[in-house]
Image (spheres, rainbow, N blue to C red):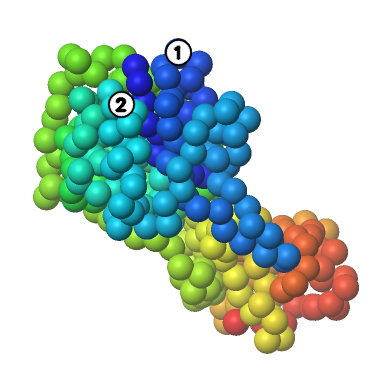
């Protein structure tokens, strides 16, 4: 089948690679423009573009595809059988959606209609869900609301971080996407129950602030959901500290005000949380520095029980 593929991050590469392995012809890849990244603000290509270049697949990078005058002409020149969309990062305009013979289908990292939007993996962890999954659906003019083509459920592992869960979803999603493409002539379309829709809006940096009045379990979910991006953080002596790894200390209580350090030892920094619970910080990243072991950080800063995170 002749395909135009829309995608940008690492999670898109799983599907792109699988589609090529199955013998389909990817005639064009549409991805996000190069962007400055890192301390030197060096212009950096998306993972999908780098993959495309390695396999000599043509790439198109419109800054705003909804206003781009050439994108539809690109599709007309190829006359694809189908558009495949995996975490592209822009809203695709209607003429592009419906131009191919089989229109456009999207791989979404949730069991739609649950968690429509940009950050379904993060919100599933943030909300403490026990399971999630992937959905292949037909694009339409509204966000993540088109007909369902196929779905596969996946359990969320205890203590799993968003990045690890996304990798697992990307892998099973790639398999399901290929199966769906192979069955596109016969696969049934199922309308979504829009009354059951929930939403997963894009996370913002300010959303990552930790409030120690929350229970240790809630704080743990935030850290797992926000690591590595946009990061979960607190302040110590007016300095921003990103917390990258830790766990709930079950069976321990404190009776102190939330945010106070309960104990410091080789396992890390124990912080008092709401509901008389304790969270153990195992790894953290001080502002302007690399991530490090929390105990090593405590030695360098000479923090003690009673010091308070805010």
Instruction: Indicate which disc residue 170 carries.
Output: none
Determine whether 42 is above or below 62 in the image: below
Determine whether 284 is above or below 175 in the image: below
Judged left or right of residue 40, residue 147 is: left
Judged left or right of residue 112, residue 289 is: right
- The numbered mark, 1 or 2, whose residue comes first in the sequence reads 1
Please state the horizontal and vertical placement of residue 71, each as a whole percent of the image: 33, 45
Which residue appears at 52% of the width and 29% of the height? 57
Which residue appears at 57% of the width and 58% of the height? 35
- Inspect this view and state whether residue 49 appears: yes
Which residue appears at 14% of the width and 27% of the height? 189
Between circles 1 and 2, the one closer to the viewer is 2
In the image, 212 versus 226, the foreground residue is: 226
Determine whether 33 is above or below 287 in the image: above
Judged left or right of residue 288, residue 228 is: left
Q: Quadrant of residue 212?
A: bottom right
Image quadrant where one finds the C terminus: bottom right
Please state the horizontal and vertical placement of residue 6, each as a whole percent of the image: 40, 39
In the image, 41 versus 289, the foreground residue is: 41
Q: Residues within 10 Å of mark 2 (few under 14, many from 20)?
A: many
Please state the horizontal and vertical placement of residue 241, each as a whole percent of the image: 68, 72
Judged left or right of residue 230, residue 200 is: left
> Badge 2 is on which residue?
80
Please state the horizontal and vertical placement of residue 259, each as a whole percent of the image: 60, 77
- Inspect this view and state whether residue 269 appears: no
Q: Residues within 10 Å of mark 1 (few under 14, many from 20)?
A: few
> Badge 1 is on which residue?
23
In the image, 155 versus 288, the foreground residue is: 288
Q: Quadrant of residue 296?
A: bottom right
């Amino acid at each position: 089948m002749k395909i135009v593929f829309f995608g940008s991050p690492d999670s898109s590469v799983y599907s792109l690679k699988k589609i090529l392995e199955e013998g389909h012809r990817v005639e064009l890849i549409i991805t996000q423009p190069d962007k400055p990244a890192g301390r030197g603000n060096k212009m950096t290509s998306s993972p999908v573009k780098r993959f495309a270049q390695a396999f000599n697949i043509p790439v198109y990078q419109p800054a705003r595809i909804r206003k781009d005058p050439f994108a539809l002409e690109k599709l007309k020149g190829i006359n694809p059988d189908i558009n495949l969309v995996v975490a592209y990062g822009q809203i695709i305009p209607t003429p592009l959606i419906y131009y191919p013979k089989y229109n456009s289908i999207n791989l979404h990292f949730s069991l739609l209609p649950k968690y429509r939007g940009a950050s379904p993996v993060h919100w599933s962890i943030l909300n403490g869900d026990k399971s999630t999954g992937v959905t292949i659906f037909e694009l339409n003019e509204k966000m993540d609301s088109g007909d369902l083509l196929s779905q596969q459920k996946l359990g969320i592992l205890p203590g799993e971080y968003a990045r690890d869960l996304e990798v697992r979803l990307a892998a099973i999603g790639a398999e399901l996407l290929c199966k769906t493409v192979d069955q596109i002539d016969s696969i049934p379309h199922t309308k979504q129950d829009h009354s059951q829709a929930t939403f997963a809006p894009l996370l913002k940096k300010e959303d990552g602030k930790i409030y120690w009045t929350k229970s240790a379990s809630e704080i743990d979910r935030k850290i797992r959901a926000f690591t590595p991006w946009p990061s979960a953080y607190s302040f110590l002596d007016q300095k921003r500290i990103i917390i990258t790894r830790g766990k709930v200390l079950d069976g321990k209580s404190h009776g102190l005000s939330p945010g106070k350090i309960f104990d410091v030892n080789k396992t890390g920094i124990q912080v008092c949380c709401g509901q008389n619970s304790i969270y153990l910080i195992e790894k953290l990243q001080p502002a302007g520095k690399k991530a490090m072991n929390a105990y090593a950080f405590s030695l360098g800063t000479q923090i003690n029980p009673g010091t308070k995170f805010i």
